[in-house]
Amino acid sequence: MVTLQKSMDAEALQELQKRSFGALLAKYLDYETNPAMESLEALRRKLAEPGREYYLIKEGESIAGFACIKQAENSLWVTPIGLLPEHQGRGLGKEAMRALEALYANASIWELMTIAEEPNLCRFYEKLGYSRTGKTSVVKPGMNLVHYSKHTCKSAKKSISKHERMKSNADL
């Protein structure tokens, strides 16, 4: 079972980022945006930002990875989330995403970006209910980020309620 534990330990988070994103760094040679390349100073600045929380993803007492949630105007961003290589492929990522969504149960819109050229990553988020928004950004030739969002039932209920109110008001 996966649990989440808040963390403000920049050094530990930096090491988790390096280990979690090292294979993607080696594959794409993206030294500008890959979390494995983030400086300790940049990570400390992010840790101090209001509306941004870092979590350790734990399996029992073992640290399996990390996640960052950033509050935007109308949504929550998962930016980034990573599992250590020895913990990948065992369903822990799915458990971690569900734990984050449960922790922030009041959020109605979730957003994230992932590498378009990584079909397993894209499928992973799609299986969790995230949909491509159509927005992409080029990181470098051969590496593009694709934007995903997920609207929870809570946001759908709000839309239905608003529609029903409008219909009721029109009937008056």
Image (cartoon, helix red, strand yellow):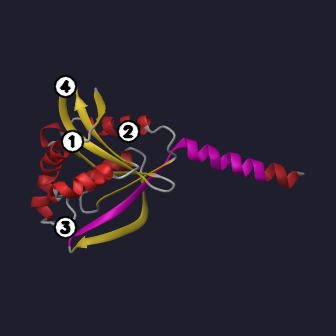
CA gap, disc 4 to disc 2? 18 Å
Instruction: Please report whichever mark, 3 or 4, sits nearer to the chain's N-terminal start.
Output: 3
Residue depth check, mark 1 versus mark 4: number of the one nearer the observer: 1
Q: Which mark is residue 61?
A: 4
Question: Would you name the residue on which mark 1 appears?
Answer: 9
Residue depth check, mark 1 versus mark 3: number of the one nearer the observer: 1
Q: Is residue 11 left or right of residue 66?
A: left
What amino acid type should be assigned to the residue bearing mark 1? Answer: Asp
Instruction: Please report whichever mark, 4 or 2, sits nearer to the chain's N-terminal start.
Output: 4
Answer above or below: position of 151 versus 90.
below
Q: Quadrant of residue 24?
A: bottom left
SS at badge 1: loop
Q: Is residue 145 magenta?
A: yes
SS at badge 2: helix
Question: Would you name the residue on which mark 3 appears?
Answer: 32
The residue drawn where x is 57% and y is 42% is 154
Q: Is residue 44 magenta?
A: no
CA gap, disc 2 to disc 3? 27 Å
Residue ranking furthest to the left: 26
Question: Would you name the residue on which mark 2 appears?
Answer: 100
CA gap, disc 1 to disc 3? 23 Å
Instruction: Please report whichever mark, 2 or 3, sits nearer to the chain's N-terminal start.
Output: 3
CA gap, disc 3 to disc 4? 33 Å
Instruction: Please report whichever mark, 1 or 4, sits nearer to the chain's N-terminal start.
Output: 1
Residue 159: x and y in percent read 64, 50
142, 74: nearer the viewer: 74
What amino acid type should be assigned to the residue bearing mark 4? Answer: Glu
Q: Residues within 10 Å of mark 1 (few under 14, many from 20)?
A: some
